[in-house]
Image (cartoon, rainbow, N blue to C red):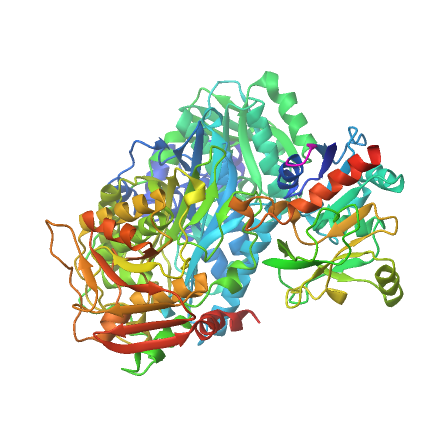
Amino acid sequence: MKFGVLQFPGSCDEVDALEAARLVGDAELIWHRDRDLQGADAIIVPGGFSYGDYLRAGAIARFSEAMESVIAFARDGGPVLGICNGFQVLCEAHLLPGALLPNINLRFTSRQVRLEVSNAETAFTSACPAGRTLSIPAKHSWGRYHAGEQTLAAIEDAGQVVLRYAPGENFNGSVADIAGVCNEAGNVMGLMPHPEHAVSELTGGSTDGLCIFESMRLAVQGAAV
Amino acid sequence: MSAPAEAETETLPTLQDALALGLTQREYELICEKQGRAPNQVELAMYSLLWSEHCAYKHSKKLLRTLPTEGEHVVMGPGENAGAVDAGSGLVCAFKVESHNHPSAVEPFQGAATGVGGILRDIFAIGARPVAVLDSLRFGEPGESARARYLLDGAVAGIGHYGNSVGVPTVGGEVYFEAPYEQNCLINAMALGLAPREQLVRSAAAGVGNVLVLFGASTGRDGIGGASVLASAELGEDDDKRPTVQVGDPFEESKLLECSLELLELGLLVALQDLGAAGLTSSASEMASKGGVGIDIDIDAVPLREADMEPFEVMVSESQERMLCVVEPRNLDAVLAVCEKWEVGGAAIGTVTDTARMRVLRDGEVLGDMPVPALVDECPLYDLQPAKPAQPLYEPPAAVLEPSGAPQKTLFALLSSPNLASRRPLYEQYDSIVGSRTVRRPEQADAAVLALPDGSALAVSIDGNGRRVAADPRRGTIAATLECAANLACVGAEPLGTTNNLNFGNPEKPHIAWQLTESVAGLGEACRALRAPIVGGNVSLYNEGATGPIYPTPVIGMVGRLPDARRAGRLGFVSPGDAIALVGPFAPSQAASELAKLRGHQLPDGLPEIDLDASVEALASVRDAVRSGALSSAHDVAEGGVAVALAECAIAGRLGADVTLGEGHWEALGPDDGPGDPGWPEGTPDAALFGEGVGGILVSGPESGLRALAARTHVRLLGRVGGERLRVSLDGHEVIDAGLGELAAVHAEGLAGWFA
């Protein structure tokens, strides 16, 4: 099982994601100019400020060479996880529904948040403990999830809302407290909080993020069997 | 020798021009002497910057030479872009603090942002990957002043914008609000980096015939004269100086950082230097000076943002996100290829020569030609003329509290006052965890703790209470240095080294010279006692405006190490039933305290005497106890005294406490050979509850562990952790009984309103 973690100029959390993925499998960085995904079984689009994000978060990164390959990989059913800036990139690439807007407080905000798993039967949440909230840090300035009424109804009906902020935790003003969504096929997920920063008792404040990576491993290895 | 060609066709600048650039008549004459003729425009521009206070330290260098700079952990002392200490297992920790005060007073967002950018470049210029930023901020009173609120909001947003975007966590810091900072705010930023010891690089240019490569952003007209006009003079009308403030681009910095580290990993560089104050002028000449060589710079080869820039503008531009390196000719193509990979500009702009002269050329025509030693090392140094002021220098602060009041009411007033309220509205705007090293986040412990690969950890703290330094420059500085060390002790760390940023007013005035002289003496004394040598730092003078000088503000940054990251201390109470003790030779006094400030007291002339050795021993005993796992929590008693420290432990741990204060009411234990109890104020509840001083640490843990501390220092057993209220009795009378929720709410709201 091998994760590929994209690296754009301006990525910040790519090494953190790499190290988190290595707790459950192999993992390598993939340079943004590289079209070759190096045989990765799953892709992580990490957090940061790709290409400076001066236009609109994720708007430039979606056009990178590596993302062209990731889009094809996702269309073929490959698992793709977007964290924070990665979530923004996947929305910009239309691999995920909706968009991320500036936080309602208009500030970069960094906070440990509790998340509820709304759908525990996805490739990204199957290993998450049932009925328990996940304590995971979030840190961003463009994290307010938005989707039009029809899209929202559709993703709610289809179980594509995977993670929600627990009551009182939705600091960015996301619609329906949505923290993470997946695509219709269930192989692409994005979330604003950072599971890669909740994998170690020492530095994470919790290890609740680990189950996201573990779920991906199970999904890949289950599919391979 | 012949004068440069341009000098013959253009009118030479005059003495008046030199004075306008901040030089004195004597300095101008000395430059003429060293040149053997009058300098032309390019040369005068370069001299005026390198001979500015900011670059030449001409009023502080003699004092700085008195500071201790050597110690067993020091790998790189002052003189390089940053200092470095041994972090164990083959790693070194590079660190430094720098100020960006005047730019921030003119334009807070960009001023603070580029302050962070500058200090990060200092770290990777010596080959270390930046792993943490801390900041030390001073503003006027936010409740009184719209300007203070504007500067605070802008500076915090700027620090966040830059640090967050570069991907370096902001792990700690401090902020104080005092009227003397109203016009002249202080923005000091400290950064830490890690490097394999063998990857450290120096900035000395070497190898005649080697190539100078300028890489990073292109050069524009921003920041012209920043070091001389802005940083080395008192503040005047802000708007005129706005064009001297640089604009930062953290994305460019992030690429530049990765590019620089990759160049070093590949072994492609002979020397590396960042471009900061005075731009190309200072970085090239300092590289030449350190290497004892000369440098020729070809102005035409410098990539420019605007085509028609004057040669002197190219040489003094402070455009951000640029680095200069020395490369062997055979490696030039490889260096430019790495630049291309990271999409940063790179251009060969000069060569190393054996002439010991700094020459600026265009089309082979010599536009400037100066002896490197004259430019870099021969600026006259000045003796200060210190004189203790006969009258108080500072107005008493505005009184916001009654002269006396019920202790509980006083506690709430202190907890919600700007200097003591929760810093969460600030640090929530910073990414404190990127990099996955942050073991203790803000307000979890007195110092930030960063995990190292070998299981140990670094701890870092930054501190400097200017009001106490104003009351007593020497003891106030000792207290600030001790507080940094206390913060480290509370997480179990032993100091490795210290950095400092001396923020003072105009040193040409005798009373400021006195503050500076006394403060540096105190800093040296404290660092010697703590065995925490100074490995680098910065001086920011002329911090005054029409309303007078700032409080003298030495900002101390200290880095330490603890052997086991898992045992890093925390400040909040942990376990109900734990005993609570006040440890150390703590003798609280109301002098220059927060409470005295809130009550509008004039600053006292002097602070109580400090027993440095006893304080250092108390810190060592707490440090060892934290390391051994004997304590559940440890928190240094600082602003607001014991009562505020108790409230902070309770709020952070979400656990109450029941505590008894006062001689005869607590159980006092102490070293056999010392006094049973250091001076405790009797009959003055405000001093006992809210008085301040050095050497006090509030700890909790199993009682046996607390008692064991008495073998080395004073221990007063105060009570127990537990419940949902903080109850404090003094001399047998209950004085505080407050619910945790109420305490936390009061603490949280103090600053929150300024960021709504």
Q: Say left or right for B617 vs A169.
A: left
In the rendered picture of this protein, how many numbered marks are placed on residues? Answer: 0
Tell which of B397 and B248 is nearer to you.
B397
Is the residue B131 above or below the residue B463 in the image?
above
Q: Position of residue B542 (x, y in %)?
A: 36, 56
Tell which of B33 and B594 is nearer to you.
B594
Q: Position of residue B551 (x, y in %)?
A: 32, 62
**Residue B588 falls in which quadrant of the image?**
bottom left
Q: Position of residue A115 (x, y in %)?
A: 67, 58
Residue at 82% across / 43% down in the picture?
A63
Residue B226 in view? yes
Check the image and name the residue furthest to the top. B330
**Residue B670 falls in which quadrant of the image?**
bottom left
Residue at 53% across / 25% down in the picture?
B326
Residue B217 in view? no
Q: Position of residue B47 (x, y in %)?
A: 42, 40
**Residue B604 falls in which quadrant of the image?**
bottom left
Q: Say left or right for B254 vs B115.
A: right
Residue at 52% across / 18% down in the picture?
B209
Is the residue B672 above or below the residue B426 in the image?
above
Residue at 80% across / 37% down in the picture?
A222
Magenta residue check for B464? no
What is the magenta range?
A: A23-27
Q: Say left or right for B121 vs B58.
A: right
Quadrant occupied by the C terminus of chain B: bottom right
Q: Main secondary structure of the magenta part?
A: loop
Tell which of B614 and B325 is nearer to you.
B614
Quadrant occupied by the N terminus of chain B: top left
